[in-house]
Each structure stands twice: as structure tokens, then as C-alpha cells.
Image (cartoon, grey):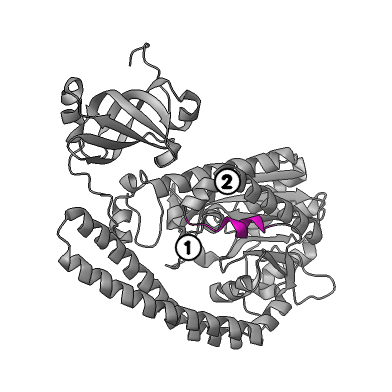
Amino acid sequence: MTNNKNYVTVSALAAYVGNEVTLSGWVWQLRSSGKILFLVIRDGTGQCQAVLEKTPEKTLLFDTLEHIGQESAIEITGNVRAEPRAPGGYELALGDGKLLHQAVDYPITPKEHGIEFLLKLRHLWLRSPRQTAIMRIRDTLIFAIREFFHNRGFTLVDTPIFAPSPGEGTQTLFEVDYFGEPMYLAQTGQLYLESAAMALRKVYCFGPTFRAEKSKTRRHLTEFWMVEPEVAFIDLNGLLELTEDFICYIVGQVLDKHRSDLEFLGRDVAKLENIRKPFVRLTYTEAVEILHGSRAEELLKNEQAQSEKKIAELETELAKAENEQTKATKSWQKDKLAAAIIQMRDQLADLREQVKNIPQHLELAKGFTWGKDLGGSDETIISKLHDRPVFVTHYPRMAKAFYMRQDRTNDRVVENFDLLAPEGVGEIIGGSAREEDLDRLLKRMQEDQLPVEPYQWYLDLRRYGSVPHGGFGLGIERTLGWLSGLKHIREAIAFPRMMGKVYP
């Protein structure tokens, strides 16, 4: 690239109205009438429409650009002008251009594609406007998380990915061969963070986490990213207050920097603007009473009626679109109708699955017994009944991990919490005060039939200067899915890992 050209990015065009600039990027869309060419270029920072008229002096340029394929790499030069109807609000009056690389038969066309097809081409799907918007929001979310803890005086501590013993249930571990010895991919950095908190008071770790749950729900990945703060000299109420501040901060940062991205994704930003303190606080026992009560039943029956009505409307629309498709004569009309048909079929499949599951969810709610952990459908019901995040605290002791602090006024429960995001999203954070009493911790490990020897280093934290402490873990993908309004968290990470899904 030569120095006499004014190279800029699409995101900076507002500062160059009336000036000549050069953009380099990839062709997203191209449309030509034979006399005027409209070309949309993407450069990783945004999209810009370029317009070229076929004049005698620009015939060669026009003919060159008219036949380049989607995702071809190009460099274009032209004058910037404001155009509210164009992507991003600005466009280029094209003066010159150069093909850098011709892409032929790009497999993802502007029409709609099914999710399985797109996942197989995830390395290319990432280029689409929807996916780049999600990735931008993810970047801001992660930066905001680090900023929050940095500003609060937390120290980042990197914890091991190879762990010799489980931090959670052994049934969700990935076992690997570590030079002839069994080792596990980390489910959590928490146990190591507890030792770091005894040294640095306020710490956090941030890294990949692995769970071997054989689940294919919209909430599950086998590899995801989690941030885990741990604090010495804190109780359960202090943890809840820290969590409220944390969530309000990251939601505010995403809203401040990505309102247009959220609106492009179809997110109702007003619901995010409602995220403010105080959050709803329920005990586990109160949550069980909600599941058994009339509010839960009324919610599910209303949802069923609304879904059945929507199904009937979509079936009518689908039949109409399919009929129009058979009569369409132009390719662009067929492509547009094909995209709409795929979208309607996907919506119908989701709605039919919801209607099918509602009676089961109602039965599970009515039959929920005290002592069980809350399931995904239970969390969905509770979170849909509130317009703000919901803390559910004091779960049954035997339903939770061995390290959670036993409530000193009720030995049946522990001092823990789950934070449920509203709108049916469910759990995005789990946390607790940690058991600081050595004898109580040993007794609980005995109840869970955990071997003591691998945990001797962890028990040392209770032998040498034990203090009240606690922390929590937040899953990035679930949180991003909630903020962005995603139906499935597979879009919340660049290359999702799920059961049966490890490529690309």
C-alpha cells in the first residue's frame, strides 16, 4: 500500500465527510443495474456502501467490479458523503478500485441458511454482520469484567487447567492422561483461588472451563469461559451486594457501547435498562413455593395459549410464502422467499417444541420436592416471573458442593446463591460463602465420600489462618446470550464445543 492514499476504516468515516479516502476489505453484497453499481464492503469495523456510475472513463473499473464474487478482497477509493439510507449512514462515491483477491462460489450466500449448515462453516459464518456484532459485544463484556475487578482492587490469579481432583461433581469431569497419571480438565479455579485470597485478599481468575455433562440444551457447552472472584473476610450478604454491583456495571457498559448492535440483533434494550439494584431475593424454600403455586401454573398455561396462537399464524404465513415461491420468476424473489420460509420453519420448530414441553414443565414444577437442585425449567419459570435478576439463596446442603458454608441457624441448608437472569434465561452465576471450619468441612467431605488425601493442601487453608470468605462464578457465554438475546449460547463463542460438535 502506498503512502499517498488516505487509508481509513469504515468505523472512522464520520470524520472524513467530503474527503477522499481508501477502504480495504471484503465484498459483502453487490448489485448492478448495468449503469449504476452498488457495492457493500465490510472491513471488520463495519459496512460501507460504495456507488459507481458507468461513465466512459470508468467503464473498465465498472466491468471489473461488476463481476467479482462475494467475499472477494478489494481496495476502493472515493469521496465520503452522508447517506442515512446506507449501512452505517455514510457511503463512498467510487473513484477507483482494485481487486486484491477473487473469491469464487462463496458457500454462505445472503439468503438464509439452516443452523447445522452454518455451524459446519463456522470459520466463515463469523464474517456475517450478526456474528460480528455478537463478537464485538463479547469483547466489551470481557473488558468490562476485567475493568470492574481491577477498579475494585482485585488481583488476577491464573489457575491451573489440569487439576488432580474435582472441584465439582465427578460425573462432569473430562479425564486426560497426564504422563501416565489420571488428570482432569478444570471445572473451576475456585479451590486454588481460595488459597490466593488468603494471600491477596481479593482475587479473580478468568479462563476456559470444561464440563462433561451429556447435555444438548441451549444453555450448555462442554468448553466455556468463566470469571471467578474470591474474597477473604466476606459473608453471603457481602457477596450478594458485590454481585449486584458487578452485573449492573457490565450491563451498563454493554448498553453504553453497543446499543446499535443490540438493536440490530433484535434485542429489547428497554429490558436491559431495567437491570438495576436491588435484585429480587428469594430463599430456595420460597422458590419451591413459587413452583408449587398458582403463578407458575398461570404463566405456563398463558405461554401455551400464546404459542399455539403464534403457531397457527405462522402456518398461514408459511403456506402463503410457499405458494408465492412457486410463482416467483426472478431469482432475487425466490431467494428472499426461501430465506423467509427457512426462518418461519425454524420458528415453528421452536414453538412446537415449547408447546410439547410445557405440560412436562408444569408437571415438574408441581411435583418438585424440597431437597432437589433446581432444574433448567424451574429456573426458567422463576426468572420469567420477575423483570430483574433473581437471587435464590440457601439451597439444601446435600444438593450442593462440599465446600459451601453450612448455615449456622439451619444445618439443612448452605449459605449459597444462584443468580437467575430474567426473561427465562435462568442461572448465569453460582456462588457461596465457603466453609471455613475445618471440622465441619471434614465431616461434609466424609458425607460425600471424598478422599481426604488429595485435598490436604486445600484443608491447610483451614489450619493456618482460616477466615470467612467466599466467591462466585459467572459464565461468559450464558451472560452474553442473555445480553444479546440469543436463543442458544452456541453463537456466544467463536468456535463452540458441544456434544458431537468439535469441528471446525
The quarter of the picture where residue 256 lies is top right
Residue type highlighted by circle 2: Leu
- The percent position of residue 481, horizontal first and vertical second, equals 51, 57
The quarter of the picture where residue 240 lies is bottom right
- Determine whether, in the image, residue 151 is placed left or right of residue 216: right
Q: Looking at the image, do the residues carrying marks 1 and 2 touch, with CB atoms under 8 Å apart?
A: no
Label 1: how many residues lie within 10 Å, few (<14), some (14-19) or many (20+)? many
Instruction: Establish if 206 lies above or below 275.
Output: above
One can see residue 102 in this view:
no
Instruction: Establish if 148 lies above or below 470.
Output: above
- Determine whether, in the image, residue 388 is placed left or right of residue 336: right
Q: Residue furthest top?
A: 4
Spatial CA span between label 1 and label 2: 19 Å
Residues rendered magenta in the picture: 266-275
- The percent position of residue 472, horizontal first and vertical second, equals 67, 56
- Determine whether, in the image, residue 442 is placed left or right of residue 358: right
Residue at the image position 36 percent from the left and 15 percent from the top: 5
Residue at the image position 20 percent from the left and 40 percent from the top: 33
The first of marks 1 and 2 along the sequence is 2
Q: Quadrant of the N terminus?
A: top left
Residue type highlighted by circle 1: His
Is 270 one of the magenta-colored residues? yes
Point out which mark residue 332 bears.
none
User: SS for tag 1?
Assistant: loop
**Mark 1 lies on residue:** 220
Is 341 one of the magenta-colored residues? no
**Mark 2 lies on residue:** 141
User: SS for tag 2?
Assistant: helix
Residues 279 and 76: in front is 76
